[in-house]
Image (cartoon, grey):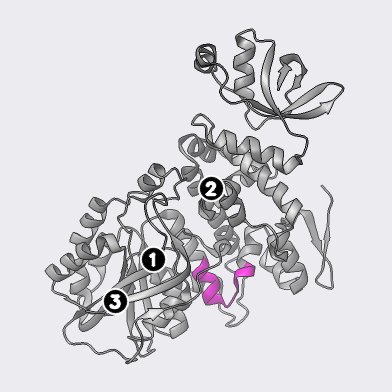
């Protein structure tokens, strides 16, 4: 149907600026309007624009008095926003900041409609699927938008670094956002080192952080491993960058890429050329290496390990997951299996023998991940226990710490651990999680500190109040803790 352009009302739009429409206007002049705009009744002979702001502006610039439109009278607020968002996300000139605000809005509308994730309702993963992006990508946009919202409301100071990063890409902004989160937690810890006592051990926090820093080193593994004495490591267990150009593959397949730095095969090859000989040097005369790697680069890893002097095990480990990962969904099926190759130096023997080579440990909940590809502590623990006796003087080395799950597995098994991490954000996340792990505190306490609560407040809260705070994301400045451990929430 055709409608007079003067009857179409443009309200709050996802786009702050519809941008340049000259090229679009020229195309419409030459070929006509190929896709009608979408409107819904607004009252008294007017219509509210749902999608097609640039097409409407282009037609107005051409002097058109009417425009082809599709009338929808069955749309609720969620559907309206979703239609406009899906249309805008297909555009290349929508800024990452505009995407972040729009995704935050649609996520909240969905939660309001279907309920919170804690009650079996709408999740971040659902938002990602509805917008054809991964859970990690959706989570990154939502986290950055939430921080921008807190800055806009005056709850946090302006953040020039975040704004600068956001102009580059959403993932540069995610780095800053993650770094701010971890630093906020560490600031709480460091500001109270002299008074904080840990529940289980009553060990000062300063001593725990000192122990953490002995286990977790910040820097390039190729440089840090040179500080490890020769033949002092009992086992090496690690998960390196995969070298599969995941960002490029996602872009080609039309998906939004997750956060990866240089994930090229050339970068991985350069790392392995330097690292493999050093791993052979530091490993004891009879020792094992378990190395997670992509199927694509198995032979590259085998080649470098053979050059370094290792023997290649004939049987790898397989971790079978209920859902798959695929870098190019247009070409290939999703892989539900990860592979870890086994290498040996000398003539070692497994401590736990006769075990199977496939594992079905459940993956982490997406909301508990700090990285897109993060293995559960339980998985790492199951493999490491097969090669260690559980003695404190045994040392397990992980050259690529990530979120520190290998070190936490070592602590659970009562074996020594040492890990390196180059990325500042990952290092901060791993350091914080290790602190709480060694202090005997759970993940909930970590989340509470992220929301601005002090350890004293966390200690007073009952479990029901803590669960509500985490589920609703209630920040510390919005509640008071009552004597019975419940909370009184202030209205905005």
Question: Of the residues tagged 2 and 3, which is closer to the observer?
Answer: 2
Label 3 packing within 10 angstroms: few (<14), some (14-19), many (20+): some
**Is residue 127 placed above or below 405 in the rendered structure?**
above
Label 1, label 2: how far apart the Cα atoms are: 30 Å
Horizontal side of 423 relative to 13 (left or right) equals left
Mainly helix, strand or loop, the magenta region?
A: helix
Q: Residue at x 79, y 58 (%)?
A: 479
- Magenta-tinted stretch: 433-445
Label 2, label 3: how far apart the Cα atoms are: 33 Å
Q: Position of residue 280 (x, y in %)?
A: 19, 73
As drawn, the label of residue 401 is: 1
Q: Can residue 473 be seen here?
A: yes
Q: Position of residue 219 (x, y in %)?
A: 34, 58
Tell me the element at label 3. loop
Horizontal side of 312 relative to 57 (left or right) equals left
Horizontal side of 265 relative to 482 (left or right) equals left
Which image quadrant for residue 300? Answer: bottom left
Label 1 packing within 10 angstroms: few (<14), some (14-19), many (20+): many
Q: Earlier in the sequence, mark 3 or mark 1?
A: 3
User: Circle 2 is placed at which residue position?
Assistant: 132
Label 2 packing within 10 angstroms: few (<14), some (14-19), many (20+): some
Q: Residue at x 35, y 73 (%)?
A: 418
User: Which sits in the foreground, 249 or 201?
Assistant: 249
Label 3, label 1: how far apart the Cα atoms are: 21 Å
Q: Residue at x 61, y 51 (%)?
A: 127
Which image quadrant: the N terminus? top right
User: Circle 3 is placed at which residue position?
Assistant: 316
Q: Earlier in the sequence, mark 1 or mark 2?
A: 2
Badge count: 3
Tell me, yes or no, whether the highlighted magenta stretch contains residue 438: yes
**Is residue 3 placed above or below 48 in the rendered structure?**
above
Which image quadrant for residue 69? Answer: top right
């Amino acid at each position: 149907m055709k409608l007079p352009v003067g009857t179409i009302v443009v309200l709050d739009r996802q786009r702050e600026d519809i941008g340049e429409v000259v090229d679009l206007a020229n195309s419409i002049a030459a070929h006509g309007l190929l896709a009608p705009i979408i409107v819904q009744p607004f009252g008294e002979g007017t219509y509210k624009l749902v999608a097609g702001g640039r097409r409407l502006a282009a037609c107005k610039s051409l002097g058109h008095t009417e425009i082809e439109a599709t009338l929808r009278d069955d749309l609720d607020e969620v559907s309206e926003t979703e239609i406009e968002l899906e249309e805008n996300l297909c555009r290349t000139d929508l800024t990452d900041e505009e995407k972040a605000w729009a995704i935050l809005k649609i996520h909240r509308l969905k939660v309001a409609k279907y309920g919170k994730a804690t009650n079996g309702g709408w999740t971040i993963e659902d938002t990602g699927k509805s917008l054809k992006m991964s859970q990690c990508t959706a989570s990154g946009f939502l986290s950055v938008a939430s921080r921008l919202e807190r800055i806009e409301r005056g709850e946090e100071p302006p953040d020039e670094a975040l704004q600068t990063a956001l102009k580059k890409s959403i993932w540069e902004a995610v780095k800053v956002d993650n770094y701010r989160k971890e630093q906020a937690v560490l600031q709480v810890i460091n500001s109270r080192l002299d008074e904080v006592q840990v529940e289980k051990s009553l060990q000062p926090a300063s001593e725990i952080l000192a122990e953490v820093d002995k286990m977790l080193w910040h820097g390039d593994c190729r440089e840090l491993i040179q500080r490890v004495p020769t033949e002092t490591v009992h086992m090496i267990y690690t998960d390196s960058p995969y070298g599969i150009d995941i960002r490029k593959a996602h872009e080609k397949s039309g998906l939004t890429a997750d956060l990866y730095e240089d994930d090229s095969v050339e970068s991985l090859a350069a790392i392995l050329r330097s690292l493999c000989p050093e791993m052979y040097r530091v490993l004891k005369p009879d020792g094992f290496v378990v190395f997670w790697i992509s199927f694509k680069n198995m032979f590259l890893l085998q080649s470098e390990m053979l050059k370094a002097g290792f023997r290649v095990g004939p049987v790898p480990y397989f971790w079978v997951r209920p859902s798959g990962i695929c870098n190019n969904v247009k070409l290939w099926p999703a892989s539900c299996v990860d592979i870890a190759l086994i290498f040996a130096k000398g003539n070692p023997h497994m401590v736990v023998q006769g075990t199977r080579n496939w594992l079905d440990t459940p993956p982490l909940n997406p909301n508990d991940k700090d990285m897109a590809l993060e293995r559960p502590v339980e998985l790492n623990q199951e493999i490491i226990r097969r090669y260690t006796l559980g003695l404190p003087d045994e040392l397990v080395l992980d050259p690529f710490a990530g979120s520190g799950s290998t070190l936490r597995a070592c602590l659970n098994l009562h074996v020594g651990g040492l890990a390196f991490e180059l990325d500042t954000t990952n290092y901060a996340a791993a350091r914080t999680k290790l602190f709480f792990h060694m202090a005997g505190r759970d993940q909930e306490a970590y989340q509470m500190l992220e929301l601005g609560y002090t350890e004293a407040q966390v200690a007073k809260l009952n479990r029901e109040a803590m669960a509500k705070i985490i589920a609703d994301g209630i920040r510390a400045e919005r509640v008071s803790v009552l004597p019975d451990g419940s909370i009184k929430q202030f209205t905005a």
